[in-house]
Amino acid sequence: VLGQVKSFTITDSELEAALENGMGFDGSSITGYQDIEESDMVAMPDPSTFRIVPWGPQEKKKAARMICDILTPERKPYEGDPRYVLRRALERMKKMGFDHYYLGPELEYFYFKDSQVTEVLDKGGYFDLTTLDVASDLRRDTILSLEAMGIPVEYSHHEVGPSQHEIDMRYADALDMADYVTTYKIVVKEIAQKHGVYATFMPKPLFGEAGSGMHTHQSLFKVDKNAFFSKDDKYHLSDTAKKFIAGQLQHAREMSSMFAQWVNSYKRLVPGYEAPVYIAWS
């Protein structure tokens, strides 16, 4: 909920031990994890997420990253670990007869001259072809870094607001996409900093301009068949799709505590800016 990625660094000589035993850390120092009396926790690296960091040193010793699963001292999954929460949900999905939950998010963000002011880099609008400026270089270098980290990119474009941009990833299974989104935000910020500018995913940094959201395309599949599609329905929506939408509408208020957890989030959720302000079929 806080949206802050936690990390630690080890040397390559410690890698084998980390993969075998994990790395201990103080869970009481992370908001929402453990009390001081039960503070011991373990970060277990997931080797499938091993990626060379493309913006790090590329000569001699390179840097790499792995995403960790959080375990208790008894080596059991910690119930508050977001990846474990998602895995449990996906297990319930499979028990209901579905094989895949695919997600295709569209992350929007702004580039500013620095972190202290909201001076934009360009005055472009939606889908505008701007001149080859700093923002164009930033998007290109960001895409190259994402692809270097194994994240498939579909396309990118200028968004509605000035200096607002979007790079769309190819849809993927939910757990992979959750990892991709976390990585995506880091890559965008790192490449921006490398170019001497500041990138922000803040929902509404500029008054009177479009805000940034994360529109998310969703689908359930049974093997290779889209469970949301029906050729006989007027809108080509199956009963599964309609129930899926109805469930999200029913729980929209509760879900907003996760999707719009900041005061600034609600400065974006106002009429006139293509932001969701009503709970309704549309």
Image (cartoon, rainbow, N blue to C red):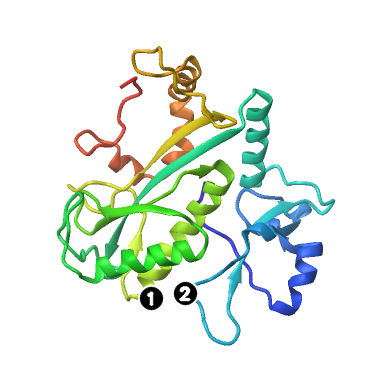
Q: Amino acid at mark 1?
A: Lys
* Placement of 26 over or under 228, stated as above or below: below
Cβ–Cβ under 8 Å for marks 1 and 2: yes
Query: SS of the residue at dot 2?
Result: loop
Residue 66 located left or right of residue 1: right
One can see residue 166 in this view: no
At x 55%, y 52%, the residue is 179
Query: SS of the residue at dot 1?
Result: helix
At x 30%, y 22%, the residue is 282
Image coordinates for residue 87, horizontal then vertical, percent: 66, 40
CA gap, disc 1 to disc 2? Answer: 8 Å
Q: Circle 1 sits on which residue?
A: 194
Based on the displayed image, in which of its 4 quarters is residue 256 positioned?
A: top left
Label 2 packing within 10 angstroms: few (<14), some (14-19), many (20+): some
At x 62%, y 59%, the residue is 49
- Closer mark to the observer between disc 1 and disc 2: 2
Q: Circle 2 sits on which residue?
A: 55
> Residue 203 or 163: which is nearer the viewer?
163
